[in-house]
Amino acid sequence: MEAYGYREGLRDGLPIGLGYLSVSFAFGITAVAAGMTPFQALLISMTNVTSAGQLAGVSLIAAAAPLTEMALTQFTINLRYALMSLSLSQKLDGSMGWLQRLIFAFCNTDEIFAVASSQPGTVGKRYLYGLMVMPWLGWSLGTILGAAAGSLLPEFVRTALGIAIYGMFLAIILPPARRSLPVRLAVVLAGGMSIALFFLTGIGGGYRIILCGVTVSALLAWLFPGEEAAP
Amino acid sequence: VSWQVYLPYVLVMAVVTYLVRAVPLTLVRKPIRSTFFRSFLRYVPYAVLAAMTFPDVLFSTGYTLSGSSLPAWSAGLTLPWAPLLCAAVGLLAGTLFAWRSKSLLTVAVVSCAAVAAAQACCLLFFR
């Protein structure tokens, strides 16, 4: 018997969807500024559903980067979803067969993962399907609104909205960094290394993220291995 | 961007992102044994997002290193690097609110509001 059904999923997804609305609005503006049409921006959001990957993707398209750099960058930035999917795969009940897992995987974002894994016991397909709806709608709707209406806004407002997506990144990385020393080190080292590479070398944005992410994560996994090291 | 250029990129983005999410959820049903690899995966999100945020957040308000194509609102100010300064104010506000574990929506909105306030101050006091 499922304690949480479709309705509860919808309800829990609503605040995520609202948060996505504002961030994807900013993404829409960024994508159009990088040369996409509003429909092209929308199509990226509808098929990717990931803030960091899309932001990096848009700048790689604008820079006419090779497809291999795009693939490697997406793989590294989104590697965290593999971890989340791994963790969540242990929490699914019997209603989540192959097909259901393939469908849910599409929308396994940071926030959906956080909500799903914070539920007591196991979770089933009704709850998870409900949970996916609002975030996906919010992410898509915000993108098309930002892409279409963004150019109507005064430049003063558009430049202020550009920071929204980084605000979201800070909201994801800083609370765990406050609680855990190794995570704090990961944030400081990766941020510092990225700044150094940016100013001292001409390395492309995608490879810079890969290099920092892999080097710092490997170093910390070597220095601070174990379950309690990171939340 | 023309569709001939756009479609291969978006296809690569969507397929790679989907596979990264779907493969572990369907194929890997046993827990990973290697402590090193498990810890590595745990650190990846924080390291990647930090590398994406710094230094890029400082350019999110339209500041460019070359000083070309700066936002039109900042033209004619007596304050040099005004967009950079506004981004730094937004970063500071976002950091403070995120550090206190405010929600995603709150931190995003506060960062934008701080940038807008800083831009307004620049226009008021440094024209």
Image (tube, rainbow, N blue to C red):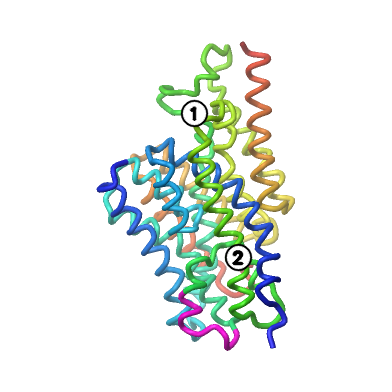
Q: Where is residue A6 in the image (x, y as percent from the top left)?
A: 65, 73
Q: Position of residue A33 (x, y in %)?
A: 43, 35
Does residue A66 show up magenta in the picture?
no
Marks 2 and 1 share the same chain:
no
- Which mark is on residue A112? 2
Q: Quadrant of the C terminus of chain A?
A: bottom right
Is residue A64 in sight in this rendering? yes
Q: A126 or B85, which is in the foreground?
A: A126
Q: Which residue is drawn at 66% across and 38% down?
A: B92
Q: B127 or A112, which is in the foreground?
A: A112
Chain identifier of the residue bearing label 1 in the image:
B
Is residue A215 in sight in this rendering? no
Placement of A87 over or under B71, stated as above or below: below
Q: A218 or A159, which is in the foreground?
A: A159
Placement of A6 over or under B28, stated as above or below: above
**Circle nearer the viewer, 2 or 1:** 2
Q: What stretch is highlighted in magenta?
A: A93-102
Q: Where is residue A187 in the image (x, y as percent from the top left)?
A: 56, 53
Q: Name the residue under label 1.
A: B63
Amino acid type at circle 2 is Ile
